[in-house]
Amino acid sequence: MFNGSGMTEIKDTVDEEQQDFIREQIRADLASGKVDKVITRFPPEPNGYLHIGHVKSICLNFGIAEEFDGECHLRFDDTNPVKEDIEFIDAIQEDVEWLGYSWGEKIYFASDNFDQLYQYAECLVEAGLAYVDDLTAEEIRELRGTLTEPGKNSPYRDRNVNENIDLFRRMKAGEFEDGSRVLRAKIDMASGNVNLRDPVLYRILTATHPRTGDNWKIYPTYDFAHGQTDAIEGVTHSLCTLEFEDHRPLYDWLIQHLPVPAKPMQYEFSRLNLTNTVLSKRRLTQLTDVGHVSGWDDPRMPTVSGLRRRGVPASAIRDFISRLAISKTEGTVEAAMLDHCVRDYLNRHAERRMGVLRPLKLVIENYPEDKTEELVAVNHPGNDSLGTRKIPFSRELYIEREDFMEDPPKKFFRLGPGREVRLRFAYFVTCNEVVKDELGEVVELRCSYDPETKGGNAPDGRKVKGTIHWVSAAHALESEVRLYNPLFENPKDGNAEDYLDKLNSDSLEILKGCFVEPLLSLATWDSPVQFERTGYFNLDRSSNEGCLVFNRTVSLRDSWAKENLKKNPS
Ligand code: ATP
Ligand code: MG
């Protein structure tokens, strides 16, 4: 199914056996005996929280390990201490587990291999395949050439092996300033692939590493550390996103020239891009640092922790990811598609409750003042096994302000002067009088109820067109409700250079003085509910006894399904 013009293709349903070029490759490698056991890895750099783009990689790597009876390692690619932090290491583990994946004992850190990686680098120097360059980063960039012009050799390229070993050891010993020297592979400055123009393998960095502290003065680059770490861990299929396709010749060159214990292969697939948001750690870091959001787990963030706090279940995220094609075609998926998966899951699983976001008082004049009834409400209309609950009913209720109109048009089937509606699970009520304040605003409805209609049906068979939700004023819990809209109103603004200027100023709307049924005092942060007729909501962790706070996970309306039905009538 095609989900909109210019948008990426997504699957309507999930195949029994997943088919894509990576799995095909793995089947072939197992069949030919090239590998006996598939080993993959998910290799986050601990410089931020995981976002939904990473989840594509997580589901692919852990999913393949499960399907082929292999293993997936969780590997922290912690080679740049300047931006890495223990907070991120912990958060990443929590998120992967919450998503439902387990690495068992197989948790690794690239930094655990720093000694071995350093030995490998010396091997290259000894073999005349790496040299210490004294050029500045700027000078190296100038000599690198362009896509159409070859690069030029550094004047330090022909240093002899002894001099290189000596300088490299002194780099390691901390004798030189940050940025004053680097170790480069000696490959080919005229290569058509810029990545092979003597790439940097080691740089000098003065920073305290979260795990190795101040032991190291030099750190390997991604290109040098990644493939070698794959080999050390015995990874068979190293799966990464397309931006590394041009790095593959370097990946292979290093594996070929080093005495590594295995020969892993790299395969690239297209990354997940989503409309109306940003999926770049650098940009997400900026949003949190500048304070445009409350933190990495702000429910507007496309991070795993943000989605979780918002109430998005892990199963819904996995369902969404399973519908994405694993291919080499770049594209963007509509955020509405994720909402659709969330709504679909919650519609089937979330218990129903009643909550009034913008309350209007309704007084039933013929209902005794001191009476309270316990009415029975079903927890899920499509799933009897979720049972029923009791909700208190009394003389004074709150209903949704938008369920009343003083001068209703023809198609408005809810409450109006002289009209009768059904109160969900309760009685029929008729509005007899409208009370206004001095500004002319409606502040109260005076109504009467029909005691014969308990449970919501009239014995005389009379019908009402509208059913509205309500809560008992004396029993309801006052709450705050937070409504979220996309971080970016225009689908592509998250990718714009000036994305900070394009943020949606209405991405958060806070409603105070909302009322929810009393059973919600038992709500927990990981069991979203449907407020009938209103949306899906999840308790926020900032709730306290004095005031419950609910996040709207997703609204009830499904714009994605509606749009697709229009485009693909079936
Ligand atoms: P970002 O682009 O957000 O800064 P990154 O690639 O620098 O992400 P890493 O921590 O290096 O972040 O990513 C870990 C793994 O997740 C990598 O293998 C990377 O290819 C993969 N990954 C990152 N972003 C996406 C995405 N949007 N879609 C699919 N995979 C992704
Ligand atoms: Mg990266």
Image (cartoon, rainbow, N blue to C red):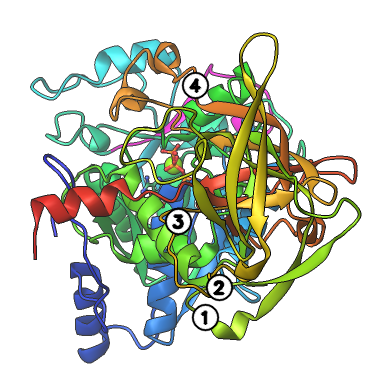
Q: Does the magenta stretch include residue 269?
A: no
| Mark 4 residue element | loop
Residue 161 x, y percent position in the rendering: 43, 37
Query: Looking at this view, is 548 or 196 the one in front?
Result: 548
Q: What residue type is labelled 4?
A: Asp
How far apart are the alpha carbons under marks 4 and 2? 32 Å
User: Residue flagged by tag 1: what amino acid is it?
Assistant: Asn
4 sits to left or right of 290: left
Amino acid marked by disc 3? Val
Mark pair 1, 2: CA separation:
5 Å
Which sits earlier in the primary sequence, circle 1 or circle 3?
A: 3
Magenta region: 171-186
- Do the residues bearing badges 1 and 2 touch, measured as CB atoms within 8 Å? yes
Chain-order first, disc 4 or disc 2: 2
Q: How far apart are marks 1 and 3 (CA)?
A: 30 Å
Camera-nearest residue between 538 and 230: 538
Dot 4, crowdedness within 10 Å: few (<14), some or many (≥20)? few
Asked if the residue under mark 2 is in contact with the one under mark 3, i.e. CB atoms within 8 Å, the reply is no
Residue carrying label 1: 383
Which residue does the numbered mark 2 point to in the structure image?
380
- The response on whether ligand 1 sits within 8 Å of label 3 is yes
Q: Mark 3 points at which residue?
A: 55
Magenta-drawn stretch contains 180: yes
In the image, is 447 to the left or to the right of 384? right
Q: Residues within 10 Å of mark 1 (few under 14, many from 20)?
A: few
